[in-house]
Amino acid sequence: MDFLRPASWAEALAVKAERPDAVPIAGGTDVMVELNFDHRRPPALLDLTRVAELAEWSERDGRVRLGAGVPYARIIAELGDRLPGLATAARTVGSPQIRNRGTVGGNLGAASPAGDAHPVLLATDAVVEVASTRGVRTVPAAEFYRGVKRNALEPDELIAAVHLDVARGPQQFAKVGTRNAMVIAVCAFGLALHPDRRRVGTGIGSAAPTPVRAPAAEDFLSAELTDAGLWASRRPLPDAVRRRFGELVAEAASPIDDVRGSAAYRRHALAVLARRTLGWAWDEYREGGWSACA
Amino acid sequence: MTQRTSPERGVREPTTTAAAAATAVTGGIGDSARRPDGTLKVRGEFAYSSDLWHEDMLWGATLRSPHPYARILSVDLTEALRTPGVHAVLTHEDVPGENIYGLEHADQPVLAVDVVRYQGEPVAVVAADHPETAQRAAKRIRVEYEPLEPVTDMVAAARGEGPPLHPDGNVVRHLRIRKGDAEATADVMVVGEYEVGMQDQAFLGPESGLAVPAEDGGVDLYVATQWLHVDQRQVARALGLPLAKVRLTLAGVGGAFGGREDLSMQVHACMLALRTGRPVKMVYNRQESFFGHVHRHPAKIYYEHGATRDGDLVYVRAKIYLDGGAYASSTTAVVANAATLGVGPYTVDNVAIDCWGVYTNNPPCGAMRGFGAVQAAFGYESQMDELARRLGVDPVELRIRNAIAEGDTMPTGQLVDSAAPVAELLRRVKNLPLPPAVRTEPVDVRELPGGVSNTTHGEGVVRGVGYGVGIKNVCFSEGFDDYSTARLRLQVIGGEATALIHTAAAEIGQGLVTIKQQIVRSELGVERVTVQPMDTSVGNGGSTSASRQTYMTGGAVRQVCHTVRERVLRMAGRRVGRAPDGLALAGGKVVDARGEVVADLAEVLGDEAVEATEVYRHRPTHRVDPERGQGNAHVQYAFAAHRAVVDVDVELGLVRVVQLDCAQDVGRAVNPQAVLGQIHGGSAQGLGLAVMEEIQVVDGRVRNPSFTDYLIPTILDMPPMTVDVLELADPHAPYGLRGVGEPPTISSTPAIVAAIRAATGRALNRVPVRPEHITGT
Ligand SMILES: Cc1cc2nc3c(=O)[nH]c(=O)nc-3n(C[C@H](O)[C@H](O)[C@H](O)COP(=O)(O)OP(=O)(O)OC[C@H]3O[C@@H](n4cnc5c(N)ncnc54)[C@H](O)[C@@H]3O)c2cc1C
């Protein structure tokens, strides 16, 4: 097995163009597990940890460009205010060791339906920046997941960064696991309120072949909030609305029975998570701090 | 973890021997002496068996059956042998001796012949110059199987249904316990059906060892095991070598919990080493480890409890089924424990228990901490709670009312002839302070069910409290010739009297190395005690299981200390011209009855080394009779009680154990810190069984052989514990001590499930409790 160690982004792209069979490795928290379990025997590894640009983030015009190689621990420490949803998801990932190594780029590269970043990336309309020697293109998160552990990357492409708006409303993330830490999601839910656009974003994890949004739930809730003037009045949300939202989220999932849980339980739990996270997000919105429109 | 209570708070009645031994020495009996290997382990520098290394060594790999039950039609080694770097590919035809082994019954082939009986059964082994090469070559072995319909239902197997997997049928053992009136009737009757899932020991150091061929045609095996001599016997038989040519040395053991009592890679590595003439190392990875050792027997249990309206137990009837999987392993002993301890720590006049241990094509099950007793306790403690509910009485009061005590008899007719403070333990856990009922805002999500996963900020959270108490036999039972051996050498090294203590008893993390040092220090009054490597050049130390090593090897060390002390005092007496009777050893000196120094120990020893070997046996036990299961089967009983406080998110079915407190009688806390460590660890393992740990098996296949999906508790799942340790001396045991390791594993599971029931109102008759069981979805 060749171990390729480019020192710059340009070099990394050149190497990937030349060796499309080389498997990128960032934190290695997915790749090394696959190698240890002998699920994968790549002819080459492309180590991205020496590419300094990947481990940087920047903010411009209300948008954050998050380098693919920024580990979860730094997202929690440095971006909790700008990207509260992603930071909440990051806090639930693995253990401190995993959060020190693991990256959102790696989560996207693995494209597991259970990846914890995905529900938030979907809910916040994040955009993935991918690059090759042929150029740069952007893919909305919702179009990035293409199947169980498959993503939209071409063989010569690498993930450069993820672009997200600095939060303009409350964001939430919750996941169910059968242990109180260090657990893979049985199901997960991400929620973002966008008062500026009078929209609501959602993302469901571990309850379909890919991470998915719940469009009907988003439309329903956006309409309820707008039609009843709730964005402006900030009145409490009727219970019926929260409940219906939960049901619609559960309906958007297509879960299966597996070792981690049953399909029926996943649906049930998603409804609960959706209802609760909406309650927390709405309470936060009502308490102020977030402006009603842009 | 913290504990409020130290052993000193408990009742202490030191035996005369213990008092005599209490010479002024630091690091002696009763001190929390430091482990000799503690610093290395904490710093990550301790060499575990997987770290073994030898110049020139080869790596072994194992080809295992993908089928739970299949005929082997053909095995083609051609491609594997052709792989560059491969030195040997061996099958059952290459087993030099008898291709059969087993702890209690020899029924398991070293390498499968004609048929495989479980998924993961070894079929062939490979040695190569690189572990990757060995793995790849193993995959190139072509085995043609004819899959057969697996036997997977333990109850059907007990009834004799399905094809026999072994010559004598599928019932490994059926044990009947009968006491009193079989027809007894009662005012109130509670019937329950319970199920226990397959728990794994989940030790962190995977199976590993190194076999080095020797010039005499024998082999030296360095291995992580629980019992060197029983391995030696089985390995020698399979290799067709005399015992003297199979020498075992204990390598660093990374946990065991019963899972290393059976052989794993021992014979395979030796076969490969003898064939290639090169040292061979084998290390399982995590996934292979799940197939490489036995697990806890899953159980199906049917109980019927009858009681008077006042809450006195009138009768207990039970049918207990234990799935032993493809090979017997410890199944007979597991059956014995489940049956003889099947009513729990209660007095009942009328008992009828039938317990079956069976063969199926599920993964083989054998020893795991508290075996037999763990499964039964989930059943009988659930029954006690249900009975209390039906009678409208407090569950602790009901237990206390029926609690067994010293002087009572067990359903086997055996007299409980030392302390059995069951009622006292229950009262103590009940009286410990409860956590505040209402949390003060803001709540840290880590303190709520779901923990860091942020599933609730208090919504749906209901608190519950539950109790459990259990009973366990200590040491080997049923007439087994159970003993341990210790060799001691006392000599002057560097001007200081130094003791070298040598046993074959396996240190598996529990701290026996420290215990041995403490006993020698106290008995001989010397500070410097060197623990020699554990190996088979000294006599059998018996198994590190059944909570027995402090009792048994501790007993042997004490005995050999007495022999050496006697000789040294005679030498001293001669030297100073006094009768040895009035002399004693303390602080590196020989002292008289008044404590006056009469000689320096180092001077008395001079150039001489005083050496002795002693064998210690506990009092004899007996097999129970086959008709009514009567007899003195056990050496000693041990008890622990738990109170669990849980917060349950009743909407999501997630649980957080808020408090898990324990009271346990240990007879004598030889090392108080180690005692607490055992109680913390055992309680955590019981917590794992209560809420998360299960090897999921469907149609004989394991669905979750990894730590990704076989979950064990983390620090956020296990609360800090308050532990109340009692020291009520057992006059039959060395220093009055009582085995510690297993009891806390037994009672913590039912206590936690009882607490979840209290919070949810659900019946919950299966462990581990899964979220679906709570939400009903
Ligand atoms: C003990 C443990 C616990 C875990 N717990 C969680 C958890 O709770 N939640 C969760 O979501 N995940 C969890 N994971 C999985 C893993 O940590 C995450 O998926 C993490 O985000 C992976 O990031 P990484 O940088 O380590 O990826 P790597 O392992 O380096 O790579 C993962 C994949 O992404 C590809 N890749 C990486 N960087 C790029 C790039 N720049 N361009 C193109 N492809 C790229 C790699 O080729 C590979 O296919 C856990 C893993 C372990 C070992």
Image (spheres, rainbow, N blue to C red):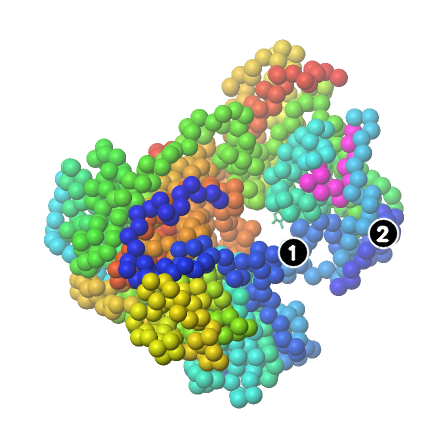
The crowding category of the residue bearing disc 2, from other C-alpha atoms within 10 Å (few below 14, some 14 to 19, many at least 20), is some
Q: Is residue B552 visible?
A: no
Please indicate whether residue B629 sits to the left or right of residue A279 in the image: left
Q: Residue tagged by mark 1?
A: A34
Q: Label 1 CB, ligand 1: below 8 Å? A: yes
Q: Which residues are magenta?
A: A63-75
Three-letter amino acid code of the residue under disc 1: Glu
Q: Earlier in the sequence, mark 2 or mark 1?
A: 2
Q: Secondary structure at mark 1?
A: helix
Q: Is residue B151 above or below residue B78?
A: above
The crowding category of the residue bearing disc 1, from other C-alpha atoms within 10 Å (few below 14, some 14 to 19, many at least 20), is few
Task: Indicate the position of residue B771 as horizontal and vertical percent values.
Answer: 45, 40
Residue A262: which numbered mark, if any? none
Chain letter of disc 1 in the image: A
Q: Nearer the viewer, residue B45 or B390?
A: B45
Please indicate whether residue B767 sits to the left or right of residue B248 in the image: left
Residue A66, magenta (yes or no): yes
Task: Indicate the position of residue A111 as horizontal and vertical percent values.
Answer: 67, 45
